[in-house]
Amino acid sequence: MNISFLIGLVAGVALVVYGIGTSGSSLSQVTQSFIDFPSMFITFGGAFSATIMSVPVKYLKDVPKNLKVLMKREKINLNEYIDTIEELAKEARLKGLLVLEEKVNAMDLQDEFLKYCVMLIVDAIEPTKVRAQIENEIDCIEARHASAWKVFDTLGSFGPAFGMLGTLIGLINMLANMDTSNGADALGKGMSTALVTTFYGSALTNMFCVPISNRLKAKHDEEMIAKELIMEGVLSIQSGENPKYIREKLNSYITYEERGSAAQADSEEGGTKKKSKRGKSRKSEANA
């Protein structure tokens, strides 16, 4: 569960509602000023209708799936990718590239993109063609991901526009039906009703559409870094580079803090293995 997104959403809505509630003289006055159903129909209905006309139906069908991805807390662990690529590099250096197919299937990798890239070098395709194919695959993934936030970008662009349209409609009705005998009171009330549509449009864009779009783009950028890391690692394996050098090259994709934690974990694992070996040797000596 993506807690930070939920905290931001709940806090934003709560603070805006609290600000609205404390800005008026009474609850009934605030309710009458900020709840206007014709304005909601114009702003929300118009924005959603224009969005449906602007984007393909397939994009709209994918909205629930994209929101589900948005709420996942999963973070891509680049260290795991580096460890896997280093292991594959060692295997290829000892036994050749053809053994990687069996190795990949035995490792039960969850990332289909990594499997795809490894299979390209197993099939003995030229390095330039492998790079071109992987880059083309990444471009296609980026195009598919762009459809996820395009719906929210489009909806966010229409929100303020239809809010302003509702304001113009309200001003036209206010001026057409203005009673001069009531003076400034009638003018102020009519202006308040006209401006509430602008508030609805701004709230739709800045509290929902833009944050959702930005979060989807952030997840996309994080995934693209992993894809580029995999591409560089697989091409390095194909060129026969030293596994340690490959690891150092791929470490540029992670921070120094993450490199230190990975090195510490490796040293602890190595110490555990040494202890187990010593224990076995002592047992064999005692038995002897």
Image: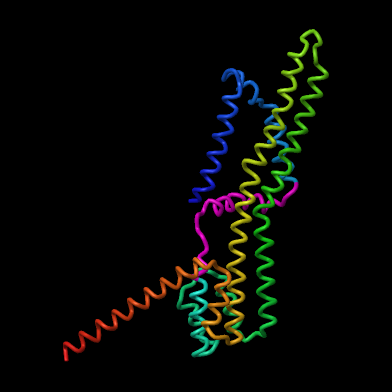
Q: Residue at x 60, y 66 (%)?
A: 225
- Coordinates of residue 235 in the picture (x, y in percent): 61, 80
For this orientation, the residue located farthest to the bottom is 288
- The count of marks equals 0
For this orientation, the residue located farthest to the left is 287
- Residue 164: name its quadrant: top right
Q: Is residue 211 above or below residue 278?
A: above
- Residue 117: name its quadrant: bottom right
Q: Is residue 199 above or below residue 206?
A: above
Please give left or right for residue 155 compared with residue 219 in the image: right
Q: Residue at x 62, y 53 (%)?
A: 62
Q: Is residue 18 magenta?
A: no
- Coordinates of residue 119 in the picture (x, y in percent): 58, 79
- Coordinates of residue 194 in the picture (x, y in percent): 74, 25
Q: Residue at x 63, y 51 (%)?
A: 214
Magenta part of the chain: 54-80
Q: Is residue 63 magenta?
A: yes
The secondary structure making up most of the magenta span is helix
Q: Residue at x 58, y 68 (%)?
A: 226
Q: How is the image coloured?
A: rainbow
Image quarter in which the C terminus is found: bottom left
For this orientation, the residue located farthest to the right is 176
- Coordinates of residue 199 in the picture (x, y in percent): 68, 32
Which of the two residues, 6 or 154, is positioned nearer the viewer here? 6
